[in-house]
Amino acid sequence: MTDSTEYTRPSSPVSIVSAPDPVFGPLPPPPPLPPPDRKNMSTVSSDTTRPSVSIITLNTSLFKHDSLSKDLNHFSSWKRQFIQTLRMNQGADGYLDGRILPPNKEAEPRAYSNWNANNGSILGFMGLVIDDVEQEVIEEAKTAEAAWKILVQRHAQEGPVKQVQLIQEALSVRYSSSEKYSTTSSKLTTLNKRIWDMGSLSSELFLCIIMINSMSNVPELRATRENVAQQFAQSDGTDPDLKTNPSARKYDSSDIKRALDMAQVLKNRVLAARNAPFRDVLGL
């Protein structure tokens, strides 16, 4: 029996076409690498062998002064010797005024470490040559520069008013038969040193001192004297440098004269009030 479905051959043979393998050409050369940062390499290399900041071994034996104390009124001489001592230690006084800045921690790690070590040494040295009260004042300071600014500001008001007290004390000293003359001479020498350690006296400054001193024996001028002394102590002196510090406050003999003029006006009013009843009685 023949199948009714007739098998038909394809009119043309089926051909399978294969895609040719891709042909890869030569790859382009990679872009050139950036040139090495020779400046940075040089910095790192020199930081290892020759850091920009070297370790300073402080020679503290050069310092010859009593420990700083506000009670002794000797900041000027203490400051001068402290700076000189650091200056003779490879110019370490630059850590006090900010001339020696800390290097970049990332670019110069060794120099940065040396700077911190030097800063710590100076802070430690500073603590050894000041009394306990002064140590408490600078306790929170992290750098020698910050501690130095605190001390300078704290002792900035030493000067004329306290010099008056020392001058008065010196002028009251007398040689006597009850004490060795050498002992009295030693007292005067010490007082004289303390007076001049507080700073030199200009003509204007000395005038202010003797004006303040001359009020001491007048009871009605006690309040005026105390006010003048306080204003003087809180000022920046008789001749501040207004160019470098425009906000500085000057206080000189003209201010004292104005205070005395005001005291005179008040005195005249009091006298006038006292004399008024007598004038009424006399019919004046």
Image: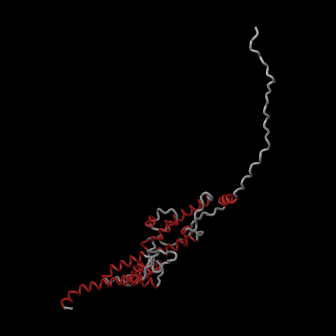
Left or right side of 97 for 32: right
Q: How many marks?
A: 0
Please report the residue visible at 64 percent of the width from the left and 62 percent of the height from the top: 51
In the orientation shown, which residue stands out farthest toward the top? 1
List x then y, in percent, for residue 190: 45, 79
Viewer-proximal residue among 204 and 57: 204
Viewer-proximal residue among 3 and 62: 3
Classify 241 as above or below 102: below
Confirm whether residue 281 shows in the render: yes
Q: Quadrant of residue 88?
A: bottom right
Classify 227 as above or below 90: below
List x then y, in percent, for residue 143: 52, 63
In the orientation shown, which residue stands out farthest toward the front? 4
Left or right side of 15 for 91: left
Please report the residue visible at 50 percent of the width from the left and 73 percent of the height from the top: 79
Left or right side of 114 for 267: left
List x then y, in percent, for residue 284: 21, 91
In the orientation shown, which residue stands out farthest toward the right? 12
In which quadrant of the rendered image does the N terminus lie? top right
**What colouring style does the render use?**
secondary structure
Left or right side of 72 for 279: left
In the orientation shown, which residue stands out farthest toward the left? 281
Please report the residue visible at 50 percent of the width from the left and 77 percent of the height from the top: 242
Confirm whether residue 182 shows in the render: no
Q: Quadrant of residue 95?
A: bottom right
List x then y, in percent, for residue 155: 45, 72
